[in-house]
Amino acid sequence: MQLADLARLSTRMFKTNPMRTWLTILGMGVGTGAVVVLVGLGFGLQKIILEQIVFGETLLSLGVSATGARSLSITDEVVAEFEDMEHIIDVAPLARYPALITYKGLTGNVFIQGAEPAYLRYGGITTTAGDVFVEEDIANGHEIMLSPAVLKLFGIEDAEGFIGQEVNFRLLIPAEDGTDAITEINIEKRYRVKGITKEEGVLNALMMLPELRNYVGVEEYDRAQVRVESSEFLNVVEEALIEEGYRVTALSKTVEQASQIFQGIQVVLATFGGIALIVSAIGMFNTMTVTLLERTKEIGIMRTIGASPRDIKMLFVSESIIVGFLGGISGIVMGVILGFSVNIMLNIAASQFGGQSVSLFSFPAPFLIFIAVFSGSVGYLTGIFPARRASLLNPLDAIRYE
């Protein structure tokens, strides 16, 4: 049988039984759409979580802090030692001191942090409003970044509106002799708010480290971000630092764990969607079996005029693949439309209530391509048994079938 003849005969069902054919495709579409929507929800949730993490250098960095178990501390000398270690290309420290922040006559307790832009890149610190510090800001000592908790301290709800406001500080430096004495350093300068970070639950104000050094001699750092050459050396450097007694955190491991969790969620969601797909496949199998009975006499005539069992088998398999594939395409269309519609409604609601726009559903192109191919495979599997029965029919018995 020529390919053109096979294509014409395989699509004849759209003319002879259009209603039943399209209902079968729609049934497959509903099952496939359920899989697309549920797995798309899993991808969307994963994207929402992982978008909070800055990729690139962040995943090649390690957070290092002193445990206190060995009386360790992170000083300039220790930072230099870190930089000399194998596979480490940069170290960005962070200093931290208690302070008082004042805004329009209101005063509250915060922690002043001093760091350079490299620390922000390595630590994945980003903003919900305003801008993050860049290299050009090192020489600019008039700007500050605040955490959302600081805004709540002053009853501020509009983060965007707070950008550009001015605040001032008083540093509270503990005495070096171990007593409870506190030295208060009043900073006369007023600082302009450059950005609001995403660090929820902490009362932090971040300024450039050189600016902090103008008011206090930084002898010890609270923590440091260590930039490793490549991902293959992360474990090596981490183990070396742990052996020296430091506490080490790796954001890359958090990402891996989160990805594994979401992969499990996607499998569970796909299983629920797969139930609907199985039901649709059973309906399609039933349709193809009924089609076989209706076309038994036709099969006998085709066999009599020269069609081989292989031709008959290919004809039925082709029909089932076409139905399955079109069912997959319709399911993808329905699932994507539903997902994007929900995203649009959520974003409209978020904009009205002052929330942040999110995409609850996400549909990666490779996933959609896989669904289309998988639907065609389901069509093949549901049609192979009726096709085999059709190819084994005796031509004379088939012609006499009523």
Image (cartoon, rainbow, N blue to C red):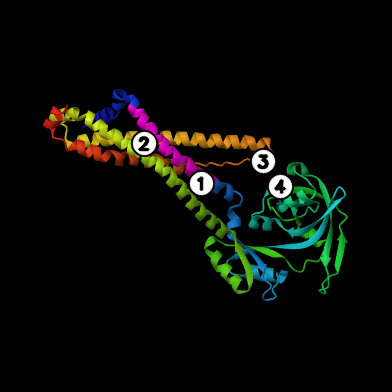
Q: Which residue is mark 3?
A: 355
Q: The residue under label 2 is which amino acid type?
A: Phe
Estimate how packed mark 1 is, as few (under 14), some (14 to 19) or many (20 or more) residues with alpha carbons within 10 Å. Answer: many
Q: What percent of the width, then of the height, locates residue 261?
A: 51, 54
Q: Identify the image quadrant of the N terminus.
A: top left
Between discs 4 and 2, the one toward the N terminus: 4
Mark 4 and mark 2: Cα distance apart in space: 48 Å
Between discs 1 and 3, the one toward the N terminus: 1
Disc 2 element: helix
Mark 4 and mark 1: Cα distance apart in space: 31 Å
Q: Which residue is mark 2?
A: 325
Estimate how packed mark 2 is, as few (under 14), some (14 to 19) or many (20 or more) residues with alpha carbons within 10 Å. Answer: many
Q: Residue at x 30, y 23 (%)?
A: 15
- Can you tell which quarter of the image residue 250 is in? bottom right
Name the disc covering residue 131, or none.
4
Q: What percent of the width, then of the height, locates residue 36?
A: 46, 40
Q: Residue at x 42, y 33 (%)?
A: 330
Disc 1 element: helix
Q: Nearer the viewer, mark 4 or mark 2?
A: 2
Which range of residues does the magenta coloring cover?
Answer: 20-44
Estimate how packed mark 3 is, as few (under 14), some (14 to 19) or many (20 or more) residues with alpha carbons within 10 Å. Answer: few
Instruction: State whether residue 66 is above or below residue 161.
Output: below
Mark 1 and mark 3: Cα distance apart in space: 22 Å
Disc 3 element: loop
Between discs 3 and 2, the one toward the N terminus: 2
Q: Nearer the viewer, mark 4 or mark 3?
A: 3
Between discs 4 and 3, the one toward the N terminus: 4
Can residue 260 be seen by looking at this rendering?
yes
Q: The residue under label 4 is which amino acid type?
A: Asp
Mark 4 and mark 3: Cα distance apart in space: 19 Å
Q: Are marks 4 and 3 in contact (CB under 8 Å)?
A: no
Q: How many marks?
A: 4
